[in-house]
Amino acid sequence: MVGILIYYVNHYLPKGPMIATGDVVCQNDGRGSCGESSVEDVRNLKIPEWAKFFKKSDGMLLFFGLLFGAIVVSAKREES
């Protein structure tokens, strides 16, 4: 369900302007191309707060946290 919400928010809701962070990110541990990192500014978007949560990387953190929790619970059940 969380994955569906992340997909919906990122593909069907309005997008905010991209703001440069000032960080330079290189691919492949510096051996690939480098470029300036940017993030989407969601402060002024007229979308619900839950959608802003998923537009930022917080939604992915929640998704992977739930996935990790499910793996741990599954392993504990098999152990018993």
Image (tube, helix red, strand yellow):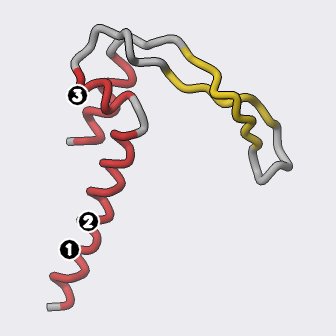
Image quadrant where residue 42 sits: top left
Residue drawn where x is 30% and y is 41% of the image: 3
Residue drawn where x is 20% and y is 90% of the image: 79
Mark 3 vs 2: CB contact within 8 A: no
**Mark 2 neighbour density, 10 Å: few (under 14) some (14–19) many (20 or more):** few
- Please identify the quadrant where the N terminus is shown: top left
Q: Amino acid at mark 2?
A: Gly
Q: Give the image location of residue 41, x and y in percent.
A: 47, 18
Which residue in the protein does label 1 denote? Answer: 73
Depth check, mark 1 against mark 3: the one in front is 3
66 sits to left or right of 38:
left
Image quadrant where residue 23 sits: top right
Q: Give the image location of residue 69, x and y in percent.
A: 26, 65
Q: Indicate which disc, 1 or 3, sits on the residue closer to the N terminus.
A: 3
- Residue in the foreground of this view, choosing between 22 and 61: 22
Relative to 27, residue 47 above or below:
above
Which residue in the protein does label 3 denote? Answer: 50
Q: Give the image location of residue 45, x and y in percent.
A: 35, 10
71 sits to left or right of 19:
left
5 sits to left or right of 39:
left
Q: Give the image location of residue 74, x and y in percent.
A: 21, 75
Element under label 2? helix
Mark 2 vs 1: CB contact within 8 A: yes
Depth check, mark 3 against mark 2: the one in front is 3
Q: Amino acid at mark 1?
A: Val
Q: Indicate which disc, 3 or 2, sits on the residue closer to the N terminus.
A: 3
Relative to 3, residue 69 above or below:
below
Q: Which mark is residue 69?
A: 2
- Please identify the quadrant where the C terminus is shown: bottom left
